[in-house]
Protein backbone atom coordinates (compact mmCIF):
# COMPACT_ATOMS: atom_id res chain seq x y z
CA UNK A 1 0.00 0.00 0.00
CA UNK A 2 1.24 3.48 -0.81
CA UNK A 3 1.40 6.08 1.97
CA UNK A 4 2.15 9.76 1.45
CA UNK A 5 5.37 10.93 3.07
CA UNK A 6 3.63 13.89 4.67
CA UNK A 7 6.21 14.35 7.43
CA UNK A 8 8.74 15.12 4.74
CA UNK A 9 6.46 17.01 2.40
CA UNK A 10 4.69 19.47 4.70
CA UNK A 11 6.49 22.64 5.80
CA UNK A 12 6.39 23.42 9.51
CA UNK A 13 4.29 26.58 9.04
CA UNK A 14 1.61 24.58 7.20
CA UNK A 15 1.65 21.82 9.79
CA UNK A 16 0.99 24.41 12.51
CA UNK A 17 -1.74 26.23 10.59
CA UNK A 18 -5.37 25.47 11.29
CA UNK A 19 -7.70 25.67 8.30
CA UNK A 20 -10.61 28.10 8.49
CA UNK A 21 -13.92 26.30 8.34
CA UNK A 22 -16.60 28.36 6.58
CA UNK A 23 -20.25 28.17 7.59
CA UNK A 24 -22.30 25.43 5.94
CA UNK A 25 -24.97 26.23 3.31
CA UNK A 26 -28.38 27.41 4.53
CA UNK A 27 -30.22 24.16 3.71
CA UNK A 28 -27.72 22.11 5.72
CA UNK A 29 -27.75 24.52 8.65
CA UNK A 30 -31.55 24.67 8.74
CA UNK A 31 -31.66 20.89 9.06
CA UNK A 32 -28.91 20.83 11.68
CA UNK A 33 -30.52 23.48 13.86
CA UNK A 34 -34.11 22.60 12.97
CA UNK A 35 -35.12 26.12 12.02
CA UNK A 36 -37.57 27.12 9.30
CA UNK A 37 -35.87 30.37 8.38
CA UNK A 38 -32.32 31.60 8.54
CA UNK A 39 -31.27 35.23 8.76
CA UNK A 40 -27.57 35.69 8.09
CA UNK A 41 -26.23 38.52 10.24
CA UNK A 42 -22.70 37.10 10.25
CA UNK A 43 -20.93 38.39 7.14
CA UNK A 44 -21.72 42.11 6.86
CA UNK A 45 -23.66 41.58 3.66
CA UNK A 46 -25.98 44.30 2.35
CA UNK A 47 -29.63 43.20 2.79
CA UNK A 48 -30.78 45.55 -0.02
CA UNK A 49 -28.92 43.42 -2.57
CA UNK A 50 -27.09 44.73 -5.65
CA UNK A 51 -27.99 48.06 -7.29
CA UNK A 52 -30.59 47.80 -10.13
CA UNK A 53 -28.06 48.33 -12.92
CA UNK A 54 -25.92 45.47 -11.58
CA UNK A 55 -28.97 43.18 -11.49
CA UNK A 56 -29.68 44.10 -15.08
CA UNK A 57 -26.08 43.45 -16.14
CA UNK A 58 -26.25 40.00 -14.54
CA UNK A 59 -29.58 39.13 -16.11
CA UNK A 60 -28.29 40.19 -19.52
CA UNK A 61 -25.03 38.29 -19.31
CA UNK A 62 -25.23 35.97 -22.35
CA UNK A 63 -24.98 32.32 -21.21
CA UNK A 64 -22.84 31.35 -24.25
CA UNK A 65 -20.20 33.76 -22.92
CA UNK A 66 -19.61 31.25 -20.11
CA UNK A 67 -17.50 29.34 -22.61
CA UNK A 68 -15.16 32.29 -23.13
CA UNK A 69 -12.43 33.42 -20.72
CA UNK A 70 -13.16 36.85 -19.23
CA UNK A 71 -10.86 39.81 -19.63
CA UNK A 72 -7.76 38.54 -17.80
CA UNK A 73 -7.02 41.88 -16.17
CA UNK A 74 -10.55 43.38 -15.92
CA UNK A 75 -9.64 45.83 -18.68
CA UNK A 76 -12.86 47.86 -18.87
CA UNK A 77 -13.50 47.89 -15.14
CA UNK A 78 -10.00 49.19 -14.43
CA UNK A 79 -10.52 51.95 -16.97
CA UNK A 80 -13.81 52.98 -15.39
CA UNK A 81 -12.35 52.94 -11.87
CA UNK A 82 -9.30 54.88 -13.02
CA UNK A 83 -11.52 57.53 -14.62
CA UNK A 84 -13.56 57.87 -11.41
CA UNK A 85 -10.48 58.25 -9.23
CA UNK A 86 -8.26 60.25 -11.58
CA UNK A 87 -5.71 57.42 -11.69
CA UNK A 88 -4.09 55.52 -14.53
CA UNK A 89 -5.69 52.08 -15.18
CA UNK A 90 -2.25 50.57 -14.52
CA UNK A 91 -2.52 51.74 -10.92
CA UNK A 92 -5.37 49.28 -10.26
CA UNK A 93 -5.41 45.48 -9.88
CA UNK A 94 -8.70 43.60 -9.66
CA UNK A 95 -8.93 40.35 -7.71
CA UNK A 96 -11.30 37.54 -6.80
CA UNK A 97 -12.52 39.54 -3.81
CA UNK A 98 -10.29 41.85 -1.78
CA UNK A 99 -9.25 38.61 -0.09
CA UNK A 100 -7.25 37.64 -3.14
CA UNK A 101 -5.38 40.94 -3.42
CA UNK A 102 -4.15 40.50 0.17
CA UNK A 103 -2.22 37.46 -1.06
CA UNK A 104 -0.88 39.38 -4.09
CA UNK A 105 0.69 42.00 -1.83
CA UNK A 106 2.22 39.57 0.67
CA UNK A 107 3.67 37.40 -2.11
CA UNK A 108 5.12 40.41 -3.89
CA UNK A 109 7.07 41.78 -0.92
CA UNK A 110 7.83 39.08 1.65
CA UNK A 111 10.67 36.60 1.52
CA UNK A 112 11.81 34.06 4.12
CA UNK A 113 12.25 35.64 7.55
CA UNK A 114 10.12 38.71 6.76
CA UNK A 115 7.01 39.78 8.65
CA UNK A 116 3.87 41.86 8.40
CA UNK A 117 2.45 44.15 11.10
CA UNK A 118 -1.26 44.55 11.83
CA UNK A 119 -3.65 44.57 14.82
CA UNK A 120 -4.57 41.59 16.97
CA UNK A 121 -8.31 42.16 16.62
CA UNK A 122 -9.03 42.98 13.02
CA UNK A 123 -9.91 41.26 9.74
CA UNK A 124 -8.05 37.97 10.17
CA UNK A 125 -7.11 37.27 6.57
CA UNK A 126 -3.94 39.44 6.66
CA UNK A 127 -2.63 37.31 9.53
CA UNK A 128 -3.73 34.02 7.97
CA UNK A 129 -2.19 34.64 4.54
CA UNK A 130 1.09 35.72 6.15
CA UNK A 131 1.24 32.66 8.38
CA UNK A 132 0.31 29.99 5.89
CA UNK A 133 2.86 31.55 3.52
CA UNK A 134 5.57 31.15 6.17
CA UNK A 135 5.83 34.78 7.35
CA UNK A 136 5.38 36.09 10.85
CA UNK A 137 2.33 38.26 11.59
CA UNK A 138 3.23 40.75 14.32
CA UNK A 139 -0.07 41.57 15.99
CA UNK A 140 -0.38 44.83 17.88
CA UNK A 141 -3.15 45.06 20.52
CA UNK A 142 -5.95 47.51 19.77
CA UNK A 143 -6.17 50.61 21.94
CA UNK A 144 -9.69 51.80 22.83
CA UNK A 145 -10.94 49.37 20.16
CA UNK A 146 -8.94 51.14 17.42
CA UNK A 147 -5.58 50.56 15.71
CA UNK A 148 -2.74 51.82 17.95
CA UNK A 149 -0.53 53.88 15.63
CA UNK A 150 2.34 54.38 18.09
CA UNK A 151 2.55 50.73 19.10
CA UNK A 152 2.39 49.71 15.43
CA UNK A 153 5.34 51.95 14.59
CA UNK A 154 7.24 50.32 17.47
CA UNK A 155 6.34 46.83 16.24
CA UNK A 156 7.88 47.51 12.83
CA UNK A 157 11.38 46.03 12.59
CA UNK A 158 13.96 45.72 9.81
CA UNK A 159 12.17 42.59 8.48
CA UNK A 160 8.72 44.20 8.27
CA UNK A 161 7.63 44.53 4.65
CA UNK A 162 3.91 45.27 4.83
CA UNK A 163 1.74 47.01 7.43
CA UNK A 164 -2.03 46.41 7.24
CA UNK A 165 -4.46 49.02 8.60
CA UNK A 166 -8.17 48.25 8.43
CA UNK A 167 -9.96 51.62 8.17
CA UNK A 168 -12.63 51.53 9.54
CA UNK A 169 -11.72 48.45 11.50
CA UNK A 170 -13.76 45.28 11.14
CA UNK A 171 -15.09 44.36 13.76
CA UNK A 172 -14.90 47.46 15.99
CA UNK A 173 -15.85 50.19 13.49
CA UNK A 174 -13.15 52.61 14.75
CA UNK A 175 -11.16 54.58 12.18
CA UNK A 176 -8.08 56.74 11.79
CA UNK A 177 -8.66 60.35 10.75
CA UNK A 178 -6.83 61.91 7.82
CA UNK A 179 -4.40 63.65 10.20
CA UNK A 180 -3.62 60.48 12.09
CA UNK A 181 -3.18 58.41 8.95
CA UNK A 182 -0.89 61.02 7.37
CA UNK A 183 1.35 61.23 10.40
CA UNK A 184 1.59 57.43 10.41
CA UNK A 185 2.56 57.47 6.73
CA UNK A 186 5.06 60.27 7.38
CA UNK A 187 6.65 58.20 10.16
CA UNK A 188 6.90 55.11 7.95
CA UNK A 189 8.48 57.38 5.33
CA UNK A 190 8.25 54.96 2.41
CA UNK A 191 10.33 52.28 4.13
CA UNK A 192 7.45 49.74 4.19
CA UNK A 193 4.34 49.10 2.15
CA UNK A 194 1.32 50.44 4.03
CA UNK A 195 -1.99 48.82 3.06
CA UNK A 196 -5.18 50.60 4.06
CA UNK A 197 -8.15 48.26 3.73
CA UNK A 198 -11.17 50.41 2.93
CA UNK A 199 -13.72 47.60 2.58
CA UNK A 200 -16.33 49.77 4.37
CA UNK A 201 -15.38 53.24 3.10
CA UNK A 202 -18.67 53.78 1.26
CA UNK A 203 -20.53 53.54 4.59
CA UNK A 204 -18.49 56.28 6.27
CA UNK A 205 -19.78 59.84 6.40
CA UNK A 206 -17.33 61.43 8.84
CA UNK A 207 -15.68 64.61 7.49
CA UNK A 208 -12.25 63.65 8.89
CA UNK A 209 -12.29 60.14 7.34
CA UNK A 210 -9.48 59.86 4.76
CA UNK A 211 -10.10 58.77 1.17
CA UNK A 212 -6.76 57.03 0.73
CA UNK A 213 -6.94 56.86 -3.05
CA UNK A 214 -6.36 60.62 -3.00
CA UNK A 215 -3.16 60.12 -0.99
CA UNK A 216 -1.46 57.74 -3.41
CA UNK A 217 0.33 60.56 -5.28
CA UNK A 218 1.81 61.83 -2.05
CA UNK A 219 2.64 58.40 -0.58
CA UNK A 220 3.87 55.97 -3.27
CA UNK A 221 4.22 53.17 -0.67
CA UNK A 222 0.46 53.29 0.06
CA UNK A 223 -1.80 50.51 -1.24
CA UNK A 224 -5.58 50.83 -0.90
CA UNK A 225 -8.03 47.91 -0.87
CA UNK A 226 -11.68 48.22 -1.89
CA UNK A 227 -14.38 45.61 -2.45
CA UNK A 228 -17.72 45.22 -4.22
CA UNK A 229 -18.86 42.76 -1.53
CA UNK A 230 -20.16 45.10 1.14
CA UNK A 231 -21.81 48.33 -0.02
CA UNK A 232 -22.44 47.03 -3.55
CA UNK A 233 -23.74 43.66 -2.38
CA UNK A 234 -21.78 41.54 -4.86
CA UNK A 235 -20.18 39.27 -2.23
CA UNK A 236 -21.34 36.16 -4.09
CA UNK A 237 -19.52 37.20 -7.26
CA UNK A 238 -16.14 37.71 -5.50
CA UNK A 239 -14.67 40.94 -6.81
CA UNK A 240 -12.44 43.56 -5.18
CA UNK A 241 -9.37 45.60 -6.11
CA UNK A 242 -6.31 47.44 -4.96
CA UNK A 243 -4.93 50.81 -6.04
CA UNK A 244 -1.45 52.23 -5.58
CA UNK A 245 1.38 54.08 -7.25
CA UNK A 246 2.46 52.88 -10.70
CA UNK A 247 5.83 51.63 -9.42
CA UNK A 248 4.35 49.59 -6.56
CA UNK A 249 1.47 48.17 -8.60
CA UNK A 250 3.97 47.15 -11.32
CA UNK A 251 5.61 44.92 -8.71
CA UNK A 252 2.39 43.51 -7.26
CA UNK A 253 1.08 42.69 -10.76
CA UNK A 254 3.80 40.03 -11.09
CA UNK A 255 2.10 37.92 -8.40
CA UNK A 256 -1.43 38.28 -9.81
CA UNK A 257 -3.26 35.28 -11.12
CA UNK A 258 -4.85 36.42 -14.37
CA UNK A 259 -8.38 35.24 -15.20
CA UNK A 260 -9.27 34.90 -11.51
CA UNK A 261 -12.15 37.38 -11.84
CA UNK A 262 -15.14 36.07 -13.78
CA UNK A 263 -17.05 37.89 -16.50
CA UNK A 264 -20.42 38.34 -14.73
CA UNK A 265 -18.56 39.84 -11.74
CA UNK A 266 -16.73 42.32 -13.97
CA UNK A 267 -19.95 43.31 -15.74
CA UNK A 268 -21.94 43.72 -12.51
CA UNK A 269 -19.16 45.68 -10.80
CA UNK A 270 -18.97 48.09 -13.70
CA UNK A 271 -22.72 48.64 -13.57
CA UNK A 272 -22.61 49.49 -9.84
CA UNK A 273 -20.34 52.45 -10.19
CA UNK A 274 -21.94 55.81 -9.78
CA UNK A 275 -25.23 54.58 -8.27
CA UNK A 276 -25.50 57.28 -5.58
CA UNK A 277 -29.09 56.32 -4.85
CA UNK A 278 -28.06 52.80 -3.79
CA UNK A 279 -25.41 54.18 -1.45
CA UNK A 280 -27.83 56.66 0.11
CA UNK A 281 -30.52 54.00 0.61
CA UNK A 282 -28.01 51.62 2.20
CA UNK A 283 -26.62 54.33 4.49
CA UNK A 284 -30.13 55.18 5.64
CA UNK A 285 -30.88 51.51 6.39
CA UNK A 286 -27.62 51.19 8.33
CA UNK A 287 -28.12 54.43 10.27
CA UNK A 288 -31.67 53.58 11.29
CA UNK A 289 -30.89 49.93 12.00
CA UNK A 290 -27.88 50.77 14.13
CA UNK A 291 -29.86 53.30 16.13
CA UNK A 292 -32.67 50.80 16.73
CA UNK A 293 -30.33 47.95 17.64
CA UNK A 294 -28.17 49.96 20.02
CA UNK A 295 -31.19 51.34 21.84
CA UNK A 296 -32.75 47.88 22.20
CA UNK A 297 -29.51 46.33 23.44
CA UNK A 298 -28.89 49.19 25.88
CA UNK A 299 -32.43 48.60 27.17
CA UNK A 300 -31.43 44.98 27.84
CA UNK A 301 -28.39 46.18 29.79
CA UNK A 302 -25.91 44.99 27.13
CA UNK A 303 -22.93 47.06 26.07
CA UNK A 304 -22.06 47.50 22.41
CA UNK A 305 -19.10 48.75 20.44
CA UNK A 306 -19.69 50.27 17.04
CA UNK A 307 -18.53 53.04 14.82
CA UNK A 308 -18.49 53.14 11.02
CA UNK A 309 -19.60 50.21 8.88
CA UNK A 310 -22.72 48.04 8.77
CA UNK A 311 -22.09 46.03 11.95
CA UNK A 312 -22.25 46.29 15.73
CA UNK A 313 -20.38 44.30 18.39
CA UNK A 314 -22.34 43.17 21.41
CA UNK A 315 -20.93 42.01 24.73
CA UNK A 316 -22.81 39.05 26.19
CA UNK A 317 -23.00 37.73 29.74
CA UNK A 318 -22.67 34.19 28.28
CA UNK A 319 -20.17 32.33 26.09
CA UNK A 320 -20.37 33.59 22.51
CA UNK A 321 -20.21 30.12 20.91
CA UNK A 322 -23.08 28.99 23.09
CA UNK A 323 -25.02 32.13 22.13
CA UNK A 324 -24.27 31.37 18.47
CA UNK A 325 -25.80 27.90 18.71
CA UNK A 326 -28.84 29.08 20.64
CA UNK A 327 -29.45 31.90 18.14
CA UNK A 328 -29.02 29.45 15.26
CA UNK A 329 -31.77 27.24 16.62
CA UNK A 330 -33.96 30.35 16.42
CA UNK A 331 -32.96 30.94 12.81
CA UNK A 332 -30.45 33.73 13.37
CA UNK A 333 -26.80 33.56 12.48
CA UNK A 334 -24.38 36.03 14.03
CA UNK A 335 -20.58 36.04 14.17
CA UNK A 336 -19.20 34.63 17.41
CA UNK A 337 -16.08 36.58 18.22
CA UNK A 338 -13.80 34.18 20.10
CA UNK A 339 -12.03 33.63 16.78
CA UNK A 340 -11.40 37.41 16.54
CA UNK A 341 -9.88 37.28 20.07
CA UNK A 342 -13.01 38.90 21.52
CA UNK A 343 -14.38 36.06 23.68
CA UNK A 344 -17.84 36.82 25.02
CA UNK A 345 -18.72 39.12 22.12
CA UNK A 346 -20.76 38.67 18.96
CA UNK A 347 -20.79 40.82 15.81
CA UNK A 348 -24.15 41.54 14.23
CA UNK A 349 -24.69 42.84 10.69
CA UNK A 350 -27.23 45.64 10.32
CA UNK A 351 -30.25 44.34 8.47
CA UNK A 352 -33.88 45.26 7.76
CA UNK A 353 -35.85 46.42 10.80
CA UNK A 354 -37.98 43.26 11.00
CA UNK A 355 -34.88 41.03 10.98
CA UNK A 356 -33.21 43.08 13.71
CA UNK A 357 -36.42 42.79 15.74
CA UNK A 358 -36.27 39.00 15.34
CA UNK A 359 -32.64 39.05 16.51
CA UNK A 360 -33.42 41.17 19.58
CA UNK A 361 -36.34 38.91 20.47
CA UNK A 362 -34.24 35.75 20.10
CA UNK A 363 -31.39 37.24 22.12
CA UNK A 364 -33.76 38.25 24.92
CA UNK A 365 -35.11 34.68 24.99
CA UNK A 366 -31.72 33.01 25.23
CA UNK A 367 -30.51 35.42 27.92
CA UNK A 368 -33.70 34.68 29.87
CA UNK A 369 -32.90 30.97 29.72
CA UNK A 370 -29.54 31.21 31.46
C1 LIG B 1 -15.32 41.68 3.80
C2 LIG B 1 -13.96 42.24 3.95
C3 LIG B 1 -12.97 42.08 2.98
C4 LIG B 1 -13.04 41.09 1.86
O1 LIG B 1 -13.90 41.30 0.95
P1 LIG B 1 -14.01 40.39 -0.37
O2 LIG B 1 -13.86 41.39 -1.45
O3 LIG B 1 -15.37 39.80 -0.26
O4 LIG B 1 -12.93 39.36 -0.37
C5 LIG B 1 -11.74 42.70 3.14
N1 LIG B 1 -11.49 43.42 4.22
C6 LIG B 1 -12.40 43.60 5.20
C7 LIG B 1 -12.06 44.43 6.36
C8 LIG B 1 -13.65 43.00 5.10
O5 LIG B 1 -14.54 43.15 6.09
Image: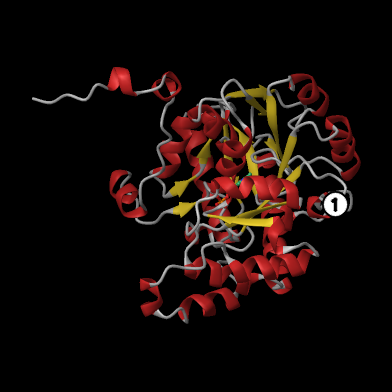
Horizontal relation, residue 306 to residue 370: left or right = right
Q: Give the residue number, with chain letter if any, for mark 1.
A: 217
Quadrant (top left/top right/bottom left/bottom right) for the N terminus: top left
Label 1: few (<14), some or many (≥20) within 10 Å? some
Residue 349, image x and y in percent?
59, 49
Residue 223, image x and y in percent?
72, 46
Is 70 located above or below residue 137 in the figure?
Answer: below
The front one of 39 and 340 is 340
Is 50 located above or below residue 310 in the figure?
Answer: below
Residue 185, image x and y in percent?
84, 36
CB of residue at label 1: within 8 Å of ligand 1?
A: no
Horizontal relation, residue 162 to residue 104: left or right = right
In this figure, which colouring scheme has been used for the structure? secondary structure
Quadrant hosting residue 119: top right
Tally of numbered discs: 1
Is 328 located above or below residue 342 in the figure?
Answer: below
Q: Residue furthest left?
A: 1
Horizontal relation, residue 75 to residue 176: left or right = left
Residue 133, image x and y in percent?
50, 30
The front one of 211 and 107 is 107
The front one of 111 and 189 is 111
Label 1, secondary structure: give it: loop
Q: Is residue 332 visible?
A: yes
Question: Residue at the spot x=84%, y=44% of the render?
Answer: 219
Is 70 located above or below residue 41 in the figure?
Answer: below
Question: Residue at the spot x=52%, y=40% of the render?
Answer: 335
Quadrant hosting residue 341: top right
The front one of 74 and 311 is 74
Q: Is residue 99 visible?
A: no
Amino acid sequence: MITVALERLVPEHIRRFEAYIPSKPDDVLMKMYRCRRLYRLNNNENPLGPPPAARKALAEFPPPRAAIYPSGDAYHLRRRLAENFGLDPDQILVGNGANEVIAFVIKAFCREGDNIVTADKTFAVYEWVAEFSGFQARLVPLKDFGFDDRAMLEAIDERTKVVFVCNPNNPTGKYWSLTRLKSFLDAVAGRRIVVVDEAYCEFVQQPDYPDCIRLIDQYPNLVVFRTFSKMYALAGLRIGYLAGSREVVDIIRRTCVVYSVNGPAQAAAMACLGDREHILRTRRLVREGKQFLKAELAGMGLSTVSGEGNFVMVRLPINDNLAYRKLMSRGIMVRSMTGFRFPGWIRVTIHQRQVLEAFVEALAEILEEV
